[in-house]
Amino acid sequence: MEFLGFIRPDGSVGSRNHLLLISTDPAADKLCLKVADTIYNAVPVVYGPVRHQSFAKYLLAIINSPNVAGAVLLGIQSQGLSENIAREMSLIGKPVEVIDISAAGGPVQAVARSTRAAVSIAREISTYRRQLSLLSRLTLGIIYKEDTKIADLLLPCMRDIIENNNVRIVIAREVVDKKDKINSLHVVKKLGVDDPVGKDRGLYELELSKDPNEIMRSMVLKGVQVVLAATDSLFAGNNALVPVINITTDKNCYETLEDSIELNLSGLDYKRYDANEYRLLIINEIIATASGKLTKAETLML
């Protein structure tokens, strides 16, 4: 199977083509948000209340996301972080520009220069075109909460894309029952915070956090390009870098959250077709989303 993605200079393939506006100093956070708000398809990444070392590590991981096409960094040049990140991005082959607030003559000029730089890079990356790539180039994230109906549909889907398409899946799951069918899949490796996804196909497991934002942050740092949320509850928010496909087998859940759920699987006819045949409904939605189909959250800009 194949999908249409953006092939990066390092060989990775993105499902999206985002420009990052990165603040490398707390003083630049508001300026970063202001510039990002004016640029099409731009994603702000603010410094916030974090330690410098942790943020530097986070940025090094996020600029390697296949869904990131380029970046503008706004901060204080003497800090060194902007230059280090820009150097890494240049090595990857992604366009990047550094704007120093002091050298620009203050915040007003820094915003103007950042905006012009962002416009330039946004125009450049807008020329990138999707190309056919094997599904094996996709790292799929799955968020799963124990549910028999979901498991019946998800298991054959996961087996198909792992065994027949050599896909790597990063899963965060909440499963109490040891007999849950998803547990029958072999886990290649349990991933810690700093552990990368291996090259081998198969299932890689993240520790499930109660905070959806923390789960998505971990998914992004592992290089996931698309996430499938199979929880029969609202996970629906959308991550700024990675599209989230929400699916449900619960009719009431869908009727309540229709504007946030991509795939309603509550009315399937199991007398006519078995769960294994319905796996293609999920696989096709994954491929379509990886190829550019917008999720509902993306369409609504949530």
Image: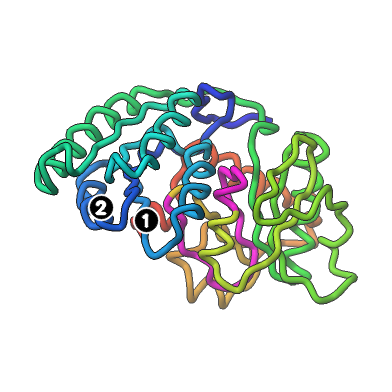
Q: Which residue is mark 1?
A: 47
Magenta region: 219-240
Residue 227 magenta: yes
Indicate the position of residue 107 as horizontal and vertical percent values.
13, 48
Tell me whether circle 2 and circle 1 mark residues in contact (CB < 8 Å): yes
**Residue type, label 2:** Ala
Q: Residue at x 80, y 44 (%)?
A: 202
Q: How many marks?
A: 2
Q: Residue at horizontal 71%, vertical 56%? A: 192
The question of residue 225 being in magenta is answered with yes
For the residues labelled 2 and 1, the Cα–Cα distance comes to 8 Å
Please name the amino acid that badge 1 sits on: Tyr
**Image quarter of residue 144:** bottom right
The tag on residue 28 is 2
At mark 2, the secondary structure is: helix
Q: Quadrant of residue 250?
A: bottom right
Q: Residue furthest front?
A: 78
Q: Residue visible at 59% across and 55% down? A: 218
Q: Residues within 10 Å of mark 2 (few under 14, many from 20)?
A: many
Q: Earlier in the sequence, mark 2 or mark 1?
A: 2
Please say which color scheme the image uses: rainbow
